[in-house]
Amino acid sequence: MKTKRKRFPSQLVEIPREFERHVTGKGGDNLLNISTLTGAQVVPRGNKLELRGPEEGVKHAELLLKRRVVCN
């Protein structure tokens, strides 16, 4: 018997090309860290990142990603 997993809406965050390297980090380390801190999945989609998870986690992940862009 399959158990139903709760579906969370996703959100796309666009990252300017010149900041992609700073945002993702070496081997995606920054994305993994953000995902671990927030509980939201961070999935690269070209120059956009898809955020999935609980609403608070997605908002927190978006904030952390935007800070990486602003600080670099």
Image (cartoon, rainbow, N blue to C red):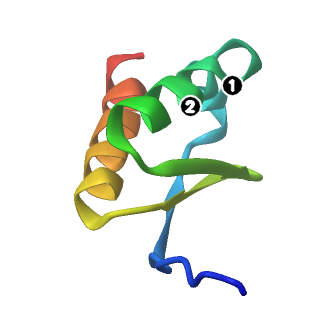
Q: Is residue 57 left or right of residue 39?
A: left
The amino acid type of the residue labelled 1 equals Gly
- Confirm or deny contact between disc 2 and disc 1 (CB under 8 A): yes
In the depicted structure, whether residue 69 falls above or below residue 45: above
Give the x, y percent position of residue 65: 40, 37
In the depicted structure, whether residue 42 falls above or below residue 23: below
Give the x, y percent position of residue 31: 56, 31
Question: In terms of depth relative to the viewer, which is nearer, 47 or 60?
Answer: 60
- Residue at position x 35%, y 48% from top? 62
Q: Is residue 62 left or right of residue 43?
A: left
Spatial CA distance of label 2 from label 1 is 5 Å
- Residue at position x 55%, y 45% from top? 15
Q: Residue furthest front?
A: 1
The residue that mark 2 highlights is 31
Give the x, y percent position of residue 14: 54, 55
The residue that mark 1 highlights is 28
In the depicted structure, whether residue 54 falls above or below residue 5: above
Circle 2: is it few (<14), some (14-19), or many (20+) Cα within 10 Å?
Answer: many
Q: Secondary structure at mark 1?
A: helix
Q: Quadrant of residue 61?
A: top left
Q: Quadrant of residue 68?
A: top left
- Residue at position x 49%, y 62% from top? 52
In the depicted structure, whether residue 70 falls above or below residue 11: above
Q: Secondary structure at mark 2?
A: helix
Circle 1: is it few (<14), some (14-19), or many (20+) Cα within 10 Å?
Answer: some
Specify the quadrant that holds the C terminus: top left
The amino acid type of the residue labelled 2 equals Leu
Q: Is residue 45 left or right of residue 71?
A: right
